[in-house]
Amino acid sequence: MGDRKINVGSMFAGVGGICKGFLDSGNGSEQKTEYHISWANEIDKNACITYRQNFPNTALYEADIFDILNNPEHAHTLEAITSKPIDILNGGFPCQAFSVAGYRKGFDDDRGHLFIAIIKLIRNFGKRSDKPRFLLLENVKNLLTHDKNRTYNIIKEKLTEEGYTVKEKIINTMHYSNLPQTRERLYIMGFLSKKDADGFTLFEDNNLEKYRTDPWISQDPRTFALLDNNVDEKYYYTQAKYPHYYNEAVNLDNDITERGQFYQLRRGMYVRHNKSNVCPTLTANMGTGGHNVPLLFDGTGVRKITPAEAFKLQGFPINNGYILPPETADCHLYKQAGNSVSIPVIKILADELMKLIK
């Protein structure tokens, strides 16, 4: 095939987790076929700062996707996005409307309507031959069964109407990566041609098992490799700073004792050790006093995971090709990590698509 760039467009790009997964796939291979991020779209201004820091050569459109689609003032942006066909359209569209951690209102929640933006953008590419050849969408696993399966049936129906054959699979990060995080997510793949759909067999039978990693064990060195050294004292819990976490009901020093293991402080009322020997699912409110704050004992004391660790738990190579903006507050970085995706899982899917393209 020779030198070729596979053009990718990224909706709801966040801090570039899906983009990074694609860029990690196939690049530098002997075939000289590689993924290229043509453009990305994100509305969160702080996430955009992080994205630009790490993808300076990618056209990032910072705007509400519905403004891009419907507001005449953004017509030039829509033209820039759709004027050049892309091979792959991806998007981890906002999941709060369907998540068990939220109110599960689905399409009754405005955030649930953001899926419709994907359909509208596909239509803006025009004729069938100009539509993206592949789709990769990511969301919480609860989307599959939300409202007695009706929500997902609508999503699948809409994608089918646009000409796509749809395949889906729930994948847990802890089983298919070297990341110690339990993160079950629904991955939705769309194929414009029947040949491509038939050729993508990863979700069938036990084909995904070739990517399965070793089970996590207590004191696993893979976990320690992701933990920061010389952590700032602001991340540590002490009785002087947090007296309400040192009482008869909760006592962090007594409840969190095993080094390198992750614990949850549940609603500030009790501590739970994650029996899978991995971090609980990172969430957008993680680390900011929310209901799912991962804690650990690092040999020095009890502390919350740092923003850098949260990003590393998603597969971002912090300080090894990926940089967190120093001016961005921790609360925004925690949110960005919790809203992102597990990069190694995306790379698996990108690797499988690369086989079809070659």
Image: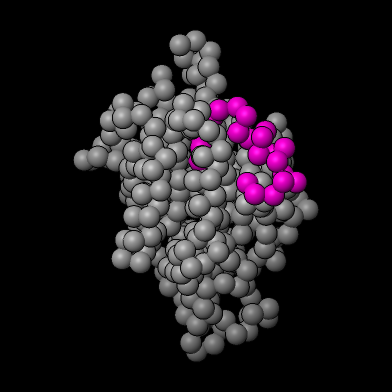
Q: Report whether 150 appears left or right of 180.
A: left
Answer whether residue 263 is visible to the viewer in this image. Answer: no
Q: Report whether 12 appears left or right of 166.
A: right
Residue 70 picture location, percent across and down: 65, 49
Residue 213 picture location, percent across and down: 34, 42
Answer whether residue 16 is visible to the viewer in this image. Answer: yes
Above or below: residue 107 compared with residue 196: below
Residue at 39% across / 32% down in the picture? 192
On whether residue 193 falls in the magenta region, the answer is: no
Nearest the viewer among 344 and 13 is 13
Q: For the view shown, which residue lies furthest in the right direction?
A: 327
Nearest the viewer among 244 and 197 is 197
Q: Which residues are magenta?
A: 69-90
Above or below: residue 301 compared with residue 141: below
Image quadrant in which the C terminus is located: top left
Residue at 48% across / 76% down in the picture? 266
Q: For the view shown, which residue lies furthest in the left direction?
A: 205
